[in-house]
Structures are given as C-alpha cells and as structure tokens.
Amino acid sequence: GEALAHFQRALALQAELGQPEVLWRAFDGLSRTEALLQHRDLAILFGKQAVNAIQSVRAHIAELDEELQRSFLEGKTGVYRRVADLLLDTGRLPEAQQILAMLKEEEYFDFIRRDARGEDPRITDASYTNREEEWVSGYRNLVERVRDSSALRAKMPNGLTEDEQTRLEKLDADLRQARKEHHKYLNELSDTFASLGGRQAIEFGKKNLDNLLATRDTLNKLGHGAVLVHYLITEDKLRIIVTGADLDIPPVHRDDAISSFELHRLILQFREKLADPLKDPLPEAQTLYRHLIDPIEADLQAYGTHTLMVYLDGALRYLPLAALHDNKQYLAERYAVVTYTAAVESRLRDPPAKDWRVAGLGVSQAVDDFPPLAAVPEELDAIVKTGESDPRGVLPGEEYLDAAFTAAGLRAVLKNRYPVIHLASHFKFEPGTLEGCFLVMGGGTRLSLAELLEGGYHLSDVDLMTLSACQTAVGGTDAEGREVECFATLIQKQGAKAVLATLWPVADRSTAHFMEQFYARRTARGLTKADALRQTQLAFIHGVEIAAAPAEGRAPDRGLVISDQRRGPSRAGERSYAHPFYWAPFILMGNWL
C-alpha cells in the first residue's frame, strides 16, 4: 500500500510539473508494484505507459540539457523486459513481440546515443487494447486538467485584487478536485482491471490481427522454411516465442527453467572452450541445446523449419547457435541460422543484386597491438577476380591491401556500388561505445563506428558487408552483446541489407578458406546467403575437401583437405577444421536471401 501511494503521489506531481523523467519512473514503479500484488493486467497497462513515456522523450531528447540526456539514457531496457515478461505470463504473445521489437530499438538508440542529426530515426509506441485505450485517453484528459489548473495557479500575481482573490480560490478548488479525481482514477483502475481476466489478450489479438498476419505473410513469402524465434532472458527463466508462416499453427510460447545467472555462466564457459581448438566444447554445447532448442523442438518440426531467424537477448548474442549440439549433430546440420536485428524488418524481403561484384579491402601487417594477418592477401586473392587474366577469384571486383586501404578508398568503392564489401582486417567490438568499436585500416588508421555513422559512408547498394576478423570483448562491463547487434543495425540503417561478422578472432588461414568457400557456394549454386553459410559450415564439420566448390577457372587449392575428425578437439599437428572454433563464429545478421 505504501509503495502504491508513493508512486501515485509521484504520478500526481508529474501531472502538475510535466517532468518526463519522473513520468516513466512513476509508471514503472506502479507497474512493478501491481505485478507484486498479482494485478498483472494493470501492471501491463502501467508498464506500457512507462515504455511509451520513454519513447516520447527519445523523440525529443536533443531538446533536453546534457544532464537530463545522461539521466535519460541510463538503464531503461529493464522496463521493456519487465513488460514483455508480464505479457508472456498472461499469454499475450503479439504484444510481447511488439515490446521486444521496441527493446531492440531502445538498445540501438542507447548505443549510438544520438545520431548526427540529434534525432532518433525510428519511434514506435506500444499499442493499447481497446479497454486500455479508454483508460489512457481518460487519464490524458485528467492530466491536462491538473496541469492547466496548476499553470494558472502559478501565474497569479502578488497583491491580488478582490476579483483575483476570488479567481485564485476557484483555481485552488479546481486543482484540489483534479487531484482527487486523479487519485480516484488510479484506485478505480485496480477494480476494473481485476475483472477483465484474459479478455485483454483476446481483444488485442483481434485488434492486431493484421500485424500478426503481416509477419506471417513475410515469413511465407521469404520461403525456405523461415521461422522467427524470440528469446527473452529473465531472472529465473528463459522465455521463447516461436512464429511460423503456417496460419493453421498459431505462435507459441515456451519457457525453460534456467536462471539468467546460470545461462550467463554456461555461455562464458562455452565461449572459453570455443576459443581454443584443443578444448572440447561439446558438454556445454549439449547443455545449452537442452535449454534453448529442446523446448521448441516439436514446434520447429511442425513448421517444417529450414531457416531459423533468431531474436537474441542479452549475452545470447555472444553465443554461436550453430554450434549447439543435440548429442548427434550440430544445430548447423539441421538449420540455417540468421540473426534478426532491429533494422531488418523493412528490407527483409528485398532481393539481392543479380550479379555480385566485390570490393575486397584488407590489412595483413601487424598494427599496434593487433597481430599480422598473413593470410589476408591469399584471402582477397581467392575471393576477388581482378580481371580476365586473374587465374583466381570467385567474384569480379578490385582489391585494396594495406596502405591502399584508406577511408577515402572505402568511400570510393561505395560510390562504385559494389554489392559486396569484404573487409579482411581487425574489427574491435567494445561494449558501450561507438568510439570503442573500430575497423583497422592501412597504416594503423582506425575507422570508428561514430565516423562510419557520420562520415558519408553510404551503403544503400550493399547486399552484404563482411568482416572476417572481428574481436568481441565479451568480458566488458556491458557484456550483453548489444555492441555486435547494434553494429549490424547501424550498418543496415546506413543502407546495407546484411552483415556477416565473427564472434571471436578466427585462425587466419582457415578464415581465408572459409570465406572463399562461402562466396563460391553462394555464386556457383545460387544459394541464399544463409544457405551458403550453412553449407560452408557443413563442409568444415564433415571433412569435405576445401576445393569442393571451386569458382570457374580458378587454380586448384594446393591440396588442403579438412580432416575427417568430425568433432572434439584437434590433435597437435593436424590440419582439422572440424572444431567449432573454425566455423562457428561466422554470424549472418539481417537480410539472408
């Protein structure tokens, strides 16, 4: 009771003062308190109002002073997660999906702080049910009355005449009445929403049927057995929503009883094993499979899944799902896995350019603390066919190596509208900052994400941007993986359809072979990007000869063969690429066609 009264007073105060920071915190406090009282529908309403208050301030954040901007940007993603969690508890899946999409926007906005124009490029609001809308509309009218009465009261001069004193008394009476109605409104909400029960979910489902049908229509038109899977990490469980194209099979919600602490521990252990090809990652791969895939196994089979589009939350973004293992095979042996990002929806169905050309840019020399990438010249040579006389190369294009790889050179190739930009150099991901995420160019110069955002790098003709030597700082203070996903979102908002990156620094020579095979399979066999990635991973897993998919006219590949050793750690001296260290870190984000 005391907590409710406290947040109600804060809300009433905000109604008079109009402080946006107080507004979302008051609504969030009421939401959390009502949730503890098991008033979930009312907690959801207040939670949605908190989310929409945050969204509203985001739209005008450039107008706030710097101190308020810093305050606003601190840690609000928990509000979105709590509302989505409540919606899943009550079976309101379409609403939960909407809030999770907004969470991606919030993470991106928080990551870039503000773009060069001082605006948030994409603002959405949480939708209300019809009953919720009635109450929200009534509340807005009530707040206007309170605020108008308070404003008029503040404008009254000193040394009042008799008429002004009479008017002041009337304003005071109106303000007291408005405050009473505000308090009464909040108390009546509890009784009303307690009687609604599950009708909210049905009501919203009907109201938003068109949105749900649009999602399924997109999945249907994408084909390739595309299924969308949302993951949400909560303190005591992992929550999963599965949506497929078949209208006869509704979206489903599953839970797995693993705590966020245990999940993060497993992910870090798995990553530690994956980073060393002499260690066996299968125990963690199998345990994580049981938590992430087993709960939805039957659903994926019912949908005839081939392409798994995954919405990843928190530290799951550091996890190469393709390397999860069901005791018989890796997930990559069953599905093509792609990451769903905040920017992808509007361009998910855009077809790729008919004929791919590539601009290959790379650094092979040691730079600062970054070691040399001795196989980069071979990597670019194997990928880029620079002319008819070039005996190697999968895609026609041009190369820029070491000193030739400059910011000006990158802008130049973008103007030439290459569908594929292949960057074979170190890319450092640092949690929490645009400046801390950067690409190493020739001579040790660095191109940060901030410069990429503001420096005239137009990517609208790019089907795929590949970064083949990424370093991701998993142990950072903000280690939730948002920097990896927000990078892909930023690139896509700049116009590119998709990003292929790595989750850890991969062996130099094996990466060169992997990238060559990826492009060769996609080009020669007419595969989607997702299937080309999966087929290359399968080649590494199953010990297929590296030269299995040569480009027409290229020279033989020096006889290097992947070992038949299918799983487990590689033995010293063996040239085996079957260990997930070599093939699992490559993740495709965005349009996978």
Image: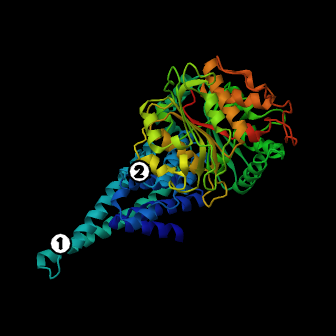
* x and y percentages locating residue 99 in the rendered image: 52, 46
Counting labels gives 2
Using the image, determine if residue 2 lies above or below residue 256: below
Structural distance between the alpha carbons of marks 1 and 2: 48 Å
* x and y percentages locating residue 475 in the rendered image: 67, 58
* x and y percentages locating residue 120 in the rendered image: 40, 49
**The one of 81 and 329 positioned closer to us in this rendering:** 329
**The one of 5 and 315 positioned closer to us in this rendering:** 315
**The one of 100 and 485 positioned closer to us in this rendering:** 485
Q: Which residue is mark 1?
A: 167
Residue 274 seen from this side: yes
* x and y percentages locating residue 232 in the rendered image: 62, 47
Q: For the residue labelled by badge 1, is the local secondary structure a helix, a strand or a loop?
A: helix
The numbered mark, 1 or 2, whose residue comes first in the sequence reads 2
Inspect the image, locate mark 1, and give the three-letter code of the amino acid beneath it.
Arg
Mark 1 Cα-neighbour bin, 10 Å: few <14, some 14–19, many ≥20? some
The quarter of the picture where residue 541 lies is: top right
Query: Which label was assigned to residue 115?
Result: 2
Say whether residue 486 is left or right of residue 18: right
